[in-house]
Image: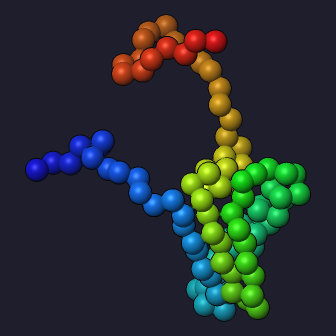
Amino acid sequence: MAKRANDHKETQDKLELNFILDNLPSAQHKTGLAGLVFLLDTMQKRKIYPIPEVLEDGGAWKFRFTRESFHKVFDELYDAETIEIESSTKWSNADPIDT
């Protein structure tokens, strides 16, 4: 039986990522970790919330994301914004936005 798109239920509310700096396989992985730490630090300084909880312990890093903080980090990373566009045709399965 084929699965339908609406069969998926989102049940996980938190995501925890653990990294040990010495166990990362390459300089690129270590740079990526540093970039994530830098991004979260700048988000905190600019008062962009919610952000994930960050714990550092002698080269081991732990990040605890909620759904909202995960979404906010990716919005910030990719400079996402909500925009409205005009369309000459109706979008299928979409309700019009009243402003």
Residue at 36% across, 21% down: 93
Q: Is residue 87 above or below residue 23?
A: above
Residue pictured at 60% horizontal, 59% vertical: 66
Q: Quadrant where the C terminus lies?
A: top right
Q: Which one is in front, 80 or 30?
A: 80
Q: Is residue 8 visible?
A: yes
Q: Residue at x 55, y 16 (%)?
A: 97
The location of residue 2, given as percent across then percent down, is 15, 48
Residue furthest out toward the top: 88
Residue drawn at 63 percent across, 69 percent down: 64
Side (left or right) of 45 relative to 62: right
Answer with left or right where residue 90 lies relative to residue 78: left
Q: Nearer the viewer, residue 38 or 31?
A: 38
Q: Is 58 left, or right, of 19 in this rendering?
A: right
Q: How is the image coloured?
A: rainbow
In percent of width and height, residue 19 lies at 62, 82
Residue 31 visible to an observer of this rendering: no
Position of 55 relative to 79 (above/below): below
Where residue 24 sits in the image (x, y, percent)? 61, 85
